[in-house]
Image: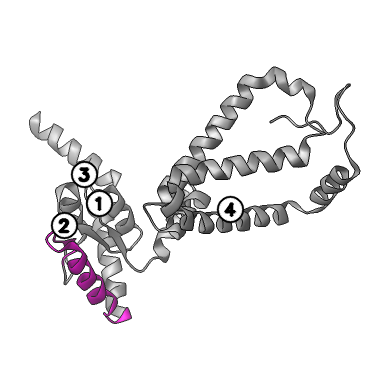
Amino acid sequence: MIISPTASPGAPDPKPTEDALARAVSAVPPPGLVLFSIVSIQLGAAVAVNLFPVLGPVGTAFLRVAFSAVLLIAAARHTIAWSARSHAGSLLLYGAILGVMNLSFYGAISRIPLGIAVAIEFVGPLGHAELAKILPAADVAVVPSIFPETFGLVAAEFAAAGVPPFVADHSGLREAGGIVGRGLPFDLRVGMDGFEENLTRALTGYLSLPEEERRGCREIVRRNSVEQLSWGTLANDVARIVGGEG
């Protein structure tokens, strides 16, 4: 919605209380507004989860958008420029995007834990530069995908960062786990029959190892990833295949 700091000709003058509210908001430094937004979103999501049994994700999302509209109109009804009507198409599109965003987010937290959903929402996509700093901080990784994969790229990325990745034993994940796990005293591939129990045993066994032994495991998976899955290794393999065919 387009908001004008001064009312357009013909529009009612802003009320003193609205001017005071605007001054109060402008007095808060940007980091404070960001923190307030974070707290508001987190509290709203926590309350929303409790409403799902009654309203469902769709009804709860509608309630959130409806209340937001009412609050916005109440707070800024005297400062909305009359010219905003000429932008009705953009306003409707913006509203639809906000509606889809809320539906998607509430649909997510109805299926996965709230903490994971909001963490993904705030962190957003990470580039390789950020991943190179974050992944090594993990002690162990789990790639539990139930869908067939051509190759376990995520597992290979963890291994390249020196983090042993336990993977579901199927499709391309099986191949990736076998490559980066060569030389380890245990198997990184977790059987699908009774997967949860198998994964629990695998993680417990690895994390109970002495720190020095775990450090050695980290070095093994990192070395395997670099030696077997790097672009240099791939280029040499392609050149060798082409040379052999020639």
Q: Residue 222: percent from the left, percent from the top?
A: 29, 61
Return the disc, 2 or 4, that comes first in the chain's sequence: 4
Report how far apart the C-alphas of labels 3 and 1 lie in the structure: 8 Å
Q: Quadrant of residue 143?
A: bottom left
Q: In terms of secondary structure, where does tag 4 sit?
A: helix
Question: Is 193 inside the magenta-drawn segment?
Answer: yes
Name of the residue lying farthest toward the top: 86
Return the disc, 1 or 2, that comes first in the chain's sequence: 1
Residue shown at 75% from the left, 41% from the top: 74
Check contact, mark 3 vs mark 1: CB within 8 A: yes
Q: Is residue 194 left or right of residue 110?
A: left
Q: Which residues are magenta?
A: 187-211
Report how far apart the C-alphas of labels 2 and 4 lie in the structure: 42 Å
Return the disc, 1 or 4, that comes first in the chain's sequence: 4
Residue with the mark numbered 2: 178
Q: Which mark is residue 149?
A: 3
> Which of the two discs, 3 and 4, sits closer to the camera?
4
Report how far apart the C-alphas of labels 1 and 4 lie in the structure: 29 Å
Return the disc, 3 or 4, that comes first in the chain's sequence: 4
Q: Residue 243: percent from the left, percent from the top?
A: 13, 33
Residue with the mark numbered 4: 41
- Label 2: how many Cα within 10 Å (few below 14, some 14–19, many 20+): some
